[in-house]
């Protein structure tokens, strides 16, 4: 009897060869959950999926939410997994919102999503199709914050929270070749934010297009039947249709002996964000900033609180609300009543749906039982 070859599992390969360099666990790296709460359409569901790609590899890419899950369920699971931030997308009658929360005790920044473009739409808008390899998403993106210098409250707090949610760069170990993606937040003149996500392609500067096509290891052997020799092919640019319209900037790194040209290709998604509220706790607590309210005293208070890191949840407000404006707002009693009414309406709609599903199941069971009772009678008639 011949014995089959023993199958080498992934666990065996990890024990023998160890983990690849990009999969090695790093300490003090921010990890995140990107989830959606409440009722949301297919477009917002795709936006959550696309933003998970932005946060790769330090996020749960295959996380599945259920309607029965509450916010405390995610928080309880996040602590043993080392998750430090949570991005919560939701939709109500006022629009779509994104909440960026620091775990486990806050603060929570609420943004109104004024507009967004999915990855599929960005890809379809380009004349030339680009394929992004899987290796691009195995390294955390570089965070670029534009227009935040010299800003006061609440922009300084916003800048600190955004920096803490992405992996920081170690200057001593930094390598330009390891840069694969860029996540950029641009602060506009009106205070709103524009988010963009790019892929970085690097190549040696000073080479013609024909030479680059010959040196590219992944490309097929070019057709040179129309050329008398290789020099004609190189001088003609390789007979390619590669677009030269992208802006190319020369870059010489500290550890590089040759100059490199860098080209950015947008991956998506795009988002236009507007900061509407900052809460001291985790989706609850004292509202330390809100649009349309003076922020003089609140700015001083939050600066002290953020400097000490003493964020806490005082228990005010609903912990698992599907709408972003909830909390202990001292001047928002009328707004709180409207939010409570909206919650009651949503609960009533969910109860109606559950009742309809139960009625359909009962009808189906009645039909099945009636068929089972009629089966013996049909058999007796046949006999």
Image: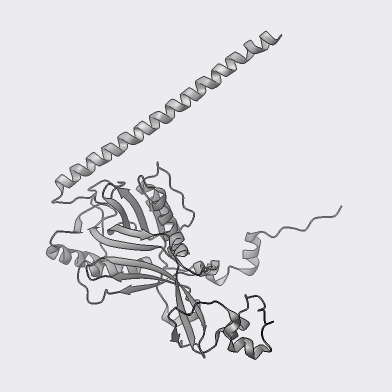
Q: Position of residue 179 (x, y in %)?
A: 47, 76
Left of 352 or right of it: where is 301? Answer: left
Give the vertical position of 289 relative to 244 (above or below): above
Residue 4 seen in the current view:
yes
Above or below 258: residue 335: above
Asked whether residue 82 is in view, the answer is: no
The one of 128 and 320 positioned closer to us in this rendering: 128
Q: State the residue at coordinates (60%, 80%).
A: 216
6 over 336 or under it: above or below? below
- Residue 332 pos. (x, y %): 15, 49
Q: Position of residue 174 (x, y in %)?
A: 45, 80
Residue at 23% across, 53% down: 285
Query: Where does the C terminus fall, quadrant-wise?
Result: top right
Residue at left offset 22%, top offset 77%: 150
The furthest residue to the right: 1
Is 162 left or right of 341, judged from the image as shown?
Answer: right
The colour mode here is one colour
Residue extending furthest toward the front:
226
């Amino acid at each position: 009897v011949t014995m089959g070859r023993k199958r080498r599992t992934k666990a065996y390969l990890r024990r023998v060869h160890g983990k690849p360099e990009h999969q090695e666990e790093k300490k003090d790296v921010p990890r995140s959950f990107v989830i959606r709460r409440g009722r949301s359409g297919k477009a917002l569901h795709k936006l959550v999926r696309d933003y998970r790609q932005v946060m790769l590899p330090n996020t749960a890419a295959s996380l599945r939410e259920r309607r029965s899950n509450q916010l405390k369920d995610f928080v309880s699971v996040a602590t043993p997994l080392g998750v430090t931030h949570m991005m919560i997308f939701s939709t109500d009658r006022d629009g779509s919102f994104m909440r960026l929360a620091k775990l486990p005790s806050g603060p929570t920044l609420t943004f109104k999503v004024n507009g967004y473009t999915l990855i599929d739409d960005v890809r379809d808008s380009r004349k030339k199709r680009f394929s992004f390899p899987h290796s691009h998403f195995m390294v955390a993106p570089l965070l670029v914050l534009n227009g935040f210098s010299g800003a006061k409250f609440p922009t300084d707090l916003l800048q600190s929270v955004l920096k803490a949610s992405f992996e920081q760069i170690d200057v001593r170990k930094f390598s330009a070749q390891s840069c694969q993606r860029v996540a950029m937040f641009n602060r506009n003149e009106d205070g709103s934010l524009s988010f963009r996500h790019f892929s970085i392609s690097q190549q040696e500067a000073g080479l013609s297009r024909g030479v680059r096509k010959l040196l590219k290891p992944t490309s097929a052997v070019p057709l040179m039947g129309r050329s008398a020799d290789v020099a004609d092919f190189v001088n003609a640019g390789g007979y390619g249709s590669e677009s030269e319209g992208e802006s190319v900037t020369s870059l010489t790194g500290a550890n590089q002996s040759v100059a490199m040209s860098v080209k950015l290709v947008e991956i998506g998604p795009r988002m236009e964000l507007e900061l509407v509220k900052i809460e001291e706790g985790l989706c609850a607590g004292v509202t330390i900033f809100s649009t349309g309210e003076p922020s003089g005293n609140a700015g001083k208070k939050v600066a002290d609180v953020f400097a000490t890191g003493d964020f806490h949840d005082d228990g005010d407000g609903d912990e698992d609300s599907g709408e972003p404006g909830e909390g202990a707002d001292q001047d928002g009693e009328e707004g709180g009543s409207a939010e409570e009414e909206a919650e009651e309406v949503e609960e009533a709609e969910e109860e109606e749906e559950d009742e309809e599903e139960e009625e359909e199941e009962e009808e189906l069971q009645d039909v099945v039982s009636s068929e089972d009772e009629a089966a013996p009678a049909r058999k007796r008639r046949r006999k």
